[in-house]
Image (cartoon, coloured by chain):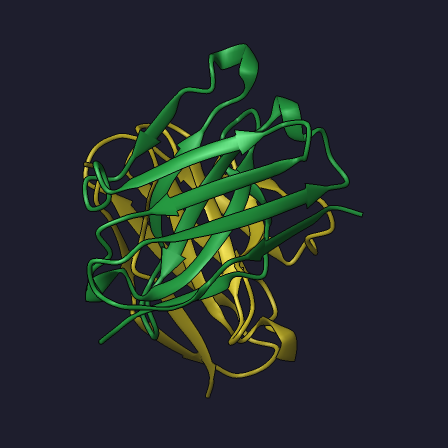
Chain colours: A green, B yellow
Amino acid sequence: EVQLVESGGGLVQPGGSLKLSCAASGFTFSGSAMHWVRQASGKGLEWVGRIRSKANNYATAYSASVKGRFTISRDDSKNTAYLQMNSLRTDDTAVYYCTRSYDPPHFDYWGQGTLVTVSS
Amino acid sequence: EIVMTQSPATLSVSPGERATLSCRASQSVSSSLAWYQQKPGQAPRLLIYGASTRATGIPARFSGSGSGTEFTLTISSLQSEDFAVYYCQQYNNWWTFGQGTKVEIK
C-alpha cells in the first residue's frame, strides 16, 4: 500500500522557519520525483516545488512565490522528502501536501497534508 | 506561466445526471493534462492523466477529452460520492492548476 505521511506543521511567527517531512512507503521512492503542493483555506491548489531523483541529479525547481525562501531536499536512505521553509509570511499559511510524480509527471500519490499557520 | 481556467465555478447537478466540466489553458499543453477530485478535508485524488486516461481504480463513468488548450471532464451519471471539487492541472510546462469546479447537489 502506498503511503505518504507529512509531518512538521504548526504555528510559526512571520519571519520564522519550519521544516516539513514526507515519509514514503509502498513505491520506489528513490526513482520518483517528489513535489510539494499547498492549499490555503478555501482556496485552490498551488504547486510549490519539486526534487527529482538521483538519476536526474536531485534537480530542484520552485514556484516564483517561494523561490529563495524554500528548499526541498530528500534522503533516499530514509524514503523521506523535506521542505525547509524560511522567512515565512502570513500568506504561506496553508495545508502542505507532498505528492509524487513519475513518468508522465502527473501527481499519482498524495499525502494527507500538514497545516502550516504563520501568525503573530 | 501557463494559466488554467476552469468553468463553471459551481455546477449544480442532480444524482444520476451527466456533468460536464471545462478547462482551458492559456497556451497549448498538448495532452499533458490531469484531473483531480478533492472532497472536504481530504487530499486530492488523481482521476485522469494524459487528458483521457483513467487512473487506477477510477470508475468508467469518469472520462476526459481534449488536447491543446481545451479539455473536458465528463461524469456520465453522478453518484452521491462524486459531489466534490474538481481541479485540472497541466504538466507540460512546470505545473499549474485551475481554480476548481465545485460539483454540488441540485
Q: Is residue B32 visible?
A: no
Left or right: A31 in relation to B39: right
> Residue B40, percent across and down?
51, 76
Q: Is residue A113 visible?
A: yes
* Residue at 56 percent of width and 58 percent of height: A7
Left or right: A11 in relation to A13: right
Q: Quadrant of residue B90?
A: top left
> Residue A16, percent across and down?
26, 58
* Residue at 70 percent of width and 56 percent of height: B59
* Residue at 50 percent of width and 54 percent of height: B36
Q: Is residue A26 above or below residue B72?
A: above
- In the image, A88 versus B35, the foreground residue is A88
Q: Is residue B83 above or below residue A25?
A: below
* Residue at 45 percent of width and 29 percent of height: A51
Q: Is residue A79 above or below residue B24?
A: above
> Residue B49, percent across and down?
53, 39
Residue sitting at the far bottom: B106
Left or right: A53 in relation to A42: right
Q: Number of labelled discs?
A: 0
Left or right: A30 in relation to A73: right
In the rendered image, which quarter contains the N terminus of chain B? top left
- In the image, A7 versus A100, the foreground residue is A7
